[in-house]
């Protein structure tokens, strides 16, 4: 099979029932479309007719766009060995698909799956292999229960033998009635296969590659906890699509590399732990709740609380080191090989055993030269020397090297003046890294130097975190977009491009969720879409307690918000909430306050949610080039830059002065207590790079 690279992942939760409610419900058909950095909100499909139409339209659009697609359905694609040949005379699984497609009658108000099951049973004696009649009327040949049930075929496929909690394909009604799903799903797959022809292949029933690959899934294999506000089927298609879309292509290829089998196989079987690790549990609604009576919170206390309450919200995936720059390591990496692996020379010169005292020395040369990369398998006799080049491993009998500039070569011997210290100009095996040493710790964002170290010790692939997807949304009727006409009283939206830029510079995937007017229903729709598309949301504006502060109001209505009154300037209360398992940071609408709150609070929190180590900003004590008399009670951050060895601050502390952000190169942090800063006094300056930008 060709190496799997898919642009789009579509996951479908199927149903064997009839017309569903107009209102989204459980035990219906749900579908979700995902790409590496974006997951659409799950789609509710009332019946199989609507689902088939949606699939045809969606797949046709993907094909027209030149995208490769994986489509997963949560029902078995085949039956245990022997059934297909007994029913159709052929072991070809697609003959069985076509057999059902010609006999199943399906409409939104009803279908004939129980009758078809009974007719099949009658062909094999009348008591099996199917059982379970969910109708009020009797169905000839189909027993209502397993009492008196006789099955001439194996109870389970090989896949179900491995997935021990999976239900049998022979059960047509009751809890776990997979048989009904299969019988109502295979005709749809048969028609999709006929429609797309060679552009569609079915894994692992056939050994050919195509732009559309259809696979069998079983979400219960790995997806367990369902966050509040989600229907289980809805959550499962979203979570499986999200995880598979973010998966490393090499791992995905490995998971799909199974033998062709007419029974079918469950995607991910045998890789359960890998898939679970890629889908951590969502946060609780009360994640940010403060103890009763807490009012103003000092900056350090707020940061300590955030650090304790948040953890990684993204999964893991393997990644070749050539593509790992900037990725976050998901576990300690230990050296599989020492560096250097063998003792070697640091210079071009001549090697021999032992040091030499002062005075002249003459040593015979062995015929061979030693160059870097050669195996050191030719011993050098005691009292002899060998020509050896930088980086070459020391052969047996050599532990010292003298520089070639200090040696005279006379035919087959060398002469030099001592003393020469034993071990001179050599590197010991493992003097840099020994086998088993931890070379990169969990949570580190990989740098070019890290990649060099990993390559040097023989690491080809590392486990890294899936990139954190951060949604950015701005709110407020007063905002218009640059390029539009601004009415009196309106302003241009500066926060969204700034926050998207900050998120990107911090190393995450920024998802622009747009601008929302002061409309609670519209904001709810954006939050719903965001919860299905990103890992965390940054909002600006609407986070206080006014009549038009819909962010805080909406989160309060959902009993999913805490307002942290941070004792800092600039800044207002920080709204923190969880919407359908997705954390939301409600930032001030003022651009200066929004940027400062992002750098101080969101930046380390996002890093930790992305699996990196918590990163306190790195600042430096420098002389002040300004004077300020600060009162006690709040920590203050001043826009600042370094000039002529001193730090100067922006002329105005006004939070609306956006030009000060562009002027600045960082922030001066003044302590919570009162302080009178005079020119020359030491103050803490945090350059933008100290925040991770």
Image: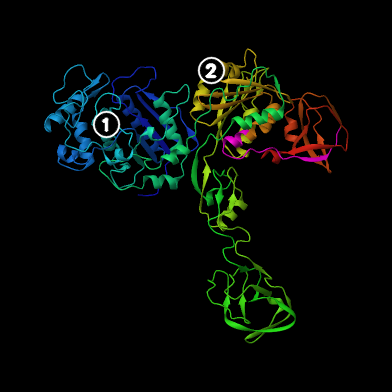
Residue 253: x percent and y percent? Answer: 40, 47
Residue 693 placed where, x, y %? 66, 40
Question: Can I make out residue 4 in this image?
Answer: no
- Disc 1: which residue: 182
Q: Residue at x 38, y 32 (%)?
A: 220
Say what secondary structure mark 1 lies in.
helix
Earlier along the polypeptide chain: callout 2 or callout 1?
1
Q: Quadrant of residue 189?
A: top left
SS for callout 2: loop
Magenta residues? Answer: 605-626
Q: CA distance from mark 2 to mark 1?
A: 39 Å
Label 2 neighbour load within 10 Å: few <14, some 14-19, many 20+: some
Viewer-closest of 421 and 60: 421
Q: How many marks?
A: 2
Q: Badge 1, how many Cα within 10 Å: few under 14, some, many 20+?
A: many
Q: Is residue 486 visible?
A: yes
Residue marked by disc 2: 558
């Amino acid at each position: 099979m060709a190496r799997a690279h898919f642009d789009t992942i579509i996951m479908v939760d199927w149903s064997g029932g009839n017309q569903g409610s107009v209102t989204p419900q459980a035990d219906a058909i749900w579908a979700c479309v995902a790409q590496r950095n974006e997951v659409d909100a799950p789609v509710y499909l009332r019946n199989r007719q609507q689902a088939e139409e949606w699939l045809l339209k969606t797949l046709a659009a993907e094909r027209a766009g030149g995208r490769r697609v994986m489509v997963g359905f949560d029902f078995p694609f085949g039956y245990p060995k022997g059934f297909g040949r007994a029913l159709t005379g052929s072991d070809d699984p697609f003959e069985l698909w076509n057999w059902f497609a010609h006999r199943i009658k399906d409409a939104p108000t009803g279908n004939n799956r129980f009758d078809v099951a009974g007719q099949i049973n009658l062909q094999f004696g009348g008591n099996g292999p199917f059982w379970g009649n969910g109708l009020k009327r009797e169905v000839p040949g189909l027993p209502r229960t397993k009492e008196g049930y006789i099955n001439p075929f194996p109870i389970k496929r090989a896949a179900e033998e491995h997935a021990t909690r999976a239900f049998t394909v022979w059960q047509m009604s009751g809890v776990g009635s997979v048989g009904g799903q299969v019988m109502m799903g295979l005709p749809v797959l048969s028609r999709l296969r006929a429609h797309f022809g060679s552009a569609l292949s079915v894994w692992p029933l056939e050994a050919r590659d195509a732009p559309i690959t259809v696979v069998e899934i079983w979400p219960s294999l790995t997806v367990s906890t369902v966050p509040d506000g989600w229907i289980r089927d809805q959550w499962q298609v979203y979570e499986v699509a999200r995880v598979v879309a973010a998966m490393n292509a090499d791992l995905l290829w490995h998971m799909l590399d199974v033998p062709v089998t007419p029974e079918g196989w469950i995607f991910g079987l045998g890789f359960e732990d890998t898939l679970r690790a890629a889908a951590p549990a969502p946060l609780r609604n009360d994640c940010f709740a403060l103890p009763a009576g807490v009012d103003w919170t000092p900056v350090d206390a707020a940061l300590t609380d955030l650090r304790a309450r948040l953890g990684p919200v993204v999964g893991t995936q393997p990644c070749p080191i050539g593509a790992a720059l900037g990725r976050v390591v998901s576990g300690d990496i230990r050296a599989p090989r020492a560096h250097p692996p063998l003792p070697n020379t640091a210079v071009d010169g001549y090697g021999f055993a032992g040091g030499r005292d002062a005075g002249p020395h003459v040593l015979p040369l062995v015929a061979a030269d030693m160059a870097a990369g050669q195996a050191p398998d030719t011993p050098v006799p005691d009292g002899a020397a060998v020509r050896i080049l930088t980086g070459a491993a020391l052969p047996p009998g050599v532990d010292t090297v003298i520089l070639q500039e200090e040696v005279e070569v006379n035919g087959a011997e060398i002469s030099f003046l001592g003393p020469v210290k034993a071990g001179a100009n050599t590197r010991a095996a493992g003097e840099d890294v020994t086998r088993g040493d931890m070379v990169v710790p969990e949570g580190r964002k990989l740098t070019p130097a890290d990649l060099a170290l990993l390559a040097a010790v023989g690491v080809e692939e590392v486990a890294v975190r899936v990139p954190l997807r951060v949604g950015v949304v701005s709110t407020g009727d007063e905002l218009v977009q640059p390029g539009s006409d601004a009415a009196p009283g309106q302003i241009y939206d500066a926060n969204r491009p700034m926050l998207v830029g900050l998120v990107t510079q911090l190393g995450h995937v920024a998802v622009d969720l747009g601008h929302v007017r002061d409309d609670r229903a519209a904001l709810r729709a954006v939050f719903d879409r965001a919860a299905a598309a990103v890992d965390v949301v940054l909002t600006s504006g609407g986070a206080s307690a006014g009549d038009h502060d819909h962010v805080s109001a909406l989160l309060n209505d959902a009993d999913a918000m805490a307002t942290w009154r941070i004792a800092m300037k600039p800044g207002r209360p920080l709204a923190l909430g969880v919407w359908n398992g997705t954390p939301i940071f409600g930032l001030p609408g003022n651009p200066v306050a929004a940027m400062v709150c992002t750098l101080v609070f969101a930046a380390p929190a996002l890093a930790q949610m992305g699996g990196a180590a918590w990163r306190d900003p790195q600042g430096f004590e420098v002389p002040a080039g300004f004077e300020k008399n600060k009162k006690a009670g709040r920590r203050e951050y001043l826009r600042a830059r370094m000039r002529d060895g001193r730090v100067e601050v922006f002329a105005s502390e006004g939070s609306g002065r956006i030009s000060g952000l562009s002027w600045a190169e960082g922030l001066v942090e003044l302590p919570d207590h009162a302080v009178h800063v005079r020119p020359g006094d030491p103050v803490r300056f945090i350059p933008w790079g100290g925040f991770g930008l």
